Image (cartoon, rainbow, N blue to C red):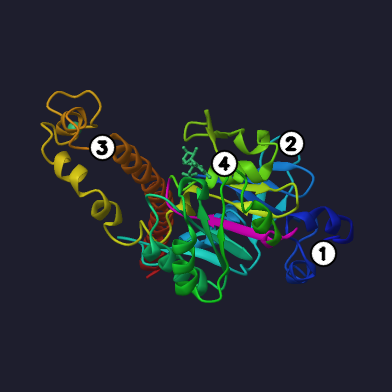
Amino acid sequence: MIAMNDTFSTLQPLGWSEEWAGSISGIGVSGWRPGRIAVEHKNRYRLWDGEREFEGIVSGRFHHEACKPSDFPVVGDWVLFEPSEYAGPVSIQKILPRRSCLTRKAAGETSSNQPLAANFDKVLITTSCNADFSLNRILRFLTLAQSSNILPIVLLTKLDLINDPTVMIDEVRCQVGAVPVLPVSAKTGEGLDVLQTYLQPGQTIAVVGSSGVGKSTLVNRLMDSSLLAVNPVREWDDKGRHTTTHRQMVLLPDGAILIDTPGIREVGLIDSEGGIEATFPEILERMKECRFTDCQHEAEPGCAVQLALANGEIQLDRYKQFTKMRNESDYQHRRESVHLQQQRKRQDKQVHQMQKQIYKNRDKR
Ligand code: GDP
Ligand code: ZN
């Protein structure tokens, strides 16, 4: 069993509660400790225990028993880990059953749903008051939040950019019923005091919304001392080299926990087949006209995209938005394919073992 009393008060600011403590009775092994996944980077994790941040990887046994993507930890998960005796990563042993989870319907090969982040109390559905305002998108996120048992809040950002927001705000309020609709500006600070009243200490809040609506700016502003939020985390790439990644879970000065991962940013958008294509048809059209089929649209000769950018047929702003959204979508695909590779390896191993068994039985006869 795990000695919990001494860790309870340090874990509480991360969202730990009596219920969580109760959920580990009986499954712990002496020496295992609870922690929360703050960053996921390929198959490496960063965990918090309220005092320190650890690097972690799933244990061999965990890996062996996991059979689908949702069996692996995501940001926001509570896990039990075995501390490392050396300087190396700690070993993640178990995920505590998730209370809530934002999932993305997996496309293509995988048949299961892809969890993106777990254990929220609330979700901030973020859309900007200006150009990319979309009632449809708000409603899509709302459905998703409601189907995941998470309390939604609609956040209309960049309030400073429009003259008279009342019509728009009323329209949204009318469509979403009892869901709170909060107009804010990260630039002027307007509306942030009201938002703060929805962000209670120990609560976990996910931030979702399209690229460019102002999520990072808002998180930084709420962090106040923007140092922590802006400072990227150093991570490892496939070859063990260090790369940087952005914080995916932050602890606000007032005690709420915000989760803002690239994965959940576009949830409900990318999974709607062809969302990006439908949004940027003029760019997709041009891409087909490039001389090389694998054109990166940078400096290649005969690049139709560069030409269209130069003569104004594609707006630079839209092209930037397009590449940003596509990169976030790629991130999701890469993440999926890591899990797929792992799954295949395991299946290969099982087949191999079965073959061995068959040969063995045959030899006996
Ligand atoms: P994200 O992709 O959702 O994280 O969006 P960012 O936080 O990167 O913001 C996108 C752009 O919108 C940046 O150029 C910000 O400076 C700008 N922006 C963010 N919030 C506000 C705001 O409240 N008012 C104005 N005028 N611009 C904002
Ligand atoms: Zn090109």
Crowd band around label 1 with a 10 angstrom C-alpha radius: few (<14), some (14–19), many (20+): few
Q: Is residue 114 visible?
A: no
Disc 1 to disc 2, how far (Cα)? 23 Å
Of residues 73 and 105, which is closer to you in this image?
Answer: 105
Q: Are marks 4 and 2 in contact (CB under 8 Å)?
A: no
Q: Which corner quadrant of the figure contains ligand 2?
A: top left
Question: Residue 315 bears which disc, if any?
Answer: 3
Q: Residue at x 75, y 58 (%)?
A: 201
Q: Residue at x 80, y 69 (%)?
A: 18
Distance of label 4 from label 1 (alpha carbons): 49 Å
Work out which residue is located at the far bottom of the displayed protein and give it. 177
Q: Position of residue 294 (x, y in %)?
A: 19, 35
Q: Earlier in the sequence, mark 3 or mark 2?
A: 2
Name the residue located 19 percent from the left edge and 24 percent from the top edge: 300
Q: Residues within 10 Å of mark 4 (few under 14, many from 20)?
A: some
Q: Which residue is mark 4?
A: 187
Residue 58: x %, y % from top left: 60, 51
Dot 2 falls on a residue whose secondary structure is: loop
First-in-chain label (1 vs 2): 1
- Find out whether the residues at labels 3 and 2 contact each other: C-beta distance under 8 Å: no
Could you tell me which secondary element the residue under label 1 belongs to? Answer: loop
- Which residue, given by chain and number where applicable, does mark 1 sit on? 1
**Disc nearer the start of the sequence (4/1):** 1
List the residue tagged with mark 2.
Answer: 86
Alpha carbon distance from label 3 to label 2: 53 Å
Label 4 or label 2, whichever comes before in sequence order: 2
